[in-house]
Image (cartoon, grey):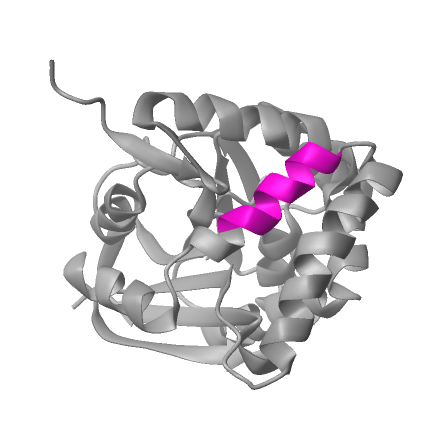
Amino acid sequence: MAERPSASFGFRDVALDEKQGMVDEVFHKVARRYDLMNDLMSAGLHRLWKDALVSRLAPPRSGRRPYQVVDVAGGTGDVAFRIVDRSNGHARVTVADINGSMLQVGRERAEARRIDGVTFVEANAEDLPFESGRFDAYTIAFGIRNVPRIDVALSEAYRVLKPGGRFLCLEFSAVDAPIADKVYEAYSMRVIPAMGRVVARDEDSYRYLVESIRRFPNQERFKAMIETAGFSRVGYTNLTLGVAALHVGVKI
């Protein structure tokens, strides 16, 4: 009997067809406190990193047609709202997230803030329900490491972009600095799960999220994966000593 394909779930290997359901359960649990925990875990740095993503995107403020962006795994709307604001309302952002609980938080936040120009769609990053060549830009922040088949998600990103469209991925990455990497590892493995237990009442979910960072490809390996998906002019910028990295590419 052939072995079932596997995928990493934190430090464990699980059946590929089981991972998505396990990830969904994590985010159903943490949805209501997700942004609060991001503030606490990163000491607010995730806000600066997301600002850096949007600054690199530099969405236009005017034009003959709206600037179309798909923000994948962005259920709570954090990145989408920044893009709409930076574009002075010219951008139209489709938030595509597989987790309904995260999307509900995003819809409620958009309504409370009276934000127009953002649409929320329940969708799988590996099989996006959009026609090819639809979007000017594809963004994903701290989400791609949770996708069971990252290579498939990258191929979908390439497919839904127009020629000249841009891919921007913000993700936790590998710290490459003496001493700092040890400090960061100790903090993330010991402090963050304990913080999840106290604040979100869910230590296991945050232990998985930390472990998933350790299993994610480093900057150079992920760059190679993006190039394999077909993107050109691929590069990355380390943020905060490589705690996070912003990868970019262009569909030529």
Which region shows up in magenta? 203-212
Judge whether 192 appears above or below 132 on screen.
Answer: below
Q: Quadrant of the N terminus?
A: top left
In-front residue for pair 152/183 = 183
Q: Quadrant of the C terminus?
A: bottom left
Indicate whether residue 205 is drawn in magenta. Answer: yes
Viewer-side residue, 121 vs 37: 37
Rendered location of residue 24, percent (x, y): 54, 26
- Asked if 31 appears above or below 223 in the picture, the reply is above
Question: What is the residue that sits farthest to the left in this orientation?
Answer: 1
Q: Is residue 134 left or right of residue 122?
A: left
Q: Residue furthest top?
A: 1
Residue 149 horizontal side relative to residue 55, left or right:
left
From the top left corner, tell me how far across and down residue 68 is, in percent.
41, 54
Residue furthest to the right: 198
Q: Which residue is painted at 75% across and 40% down in the image?
A: 109
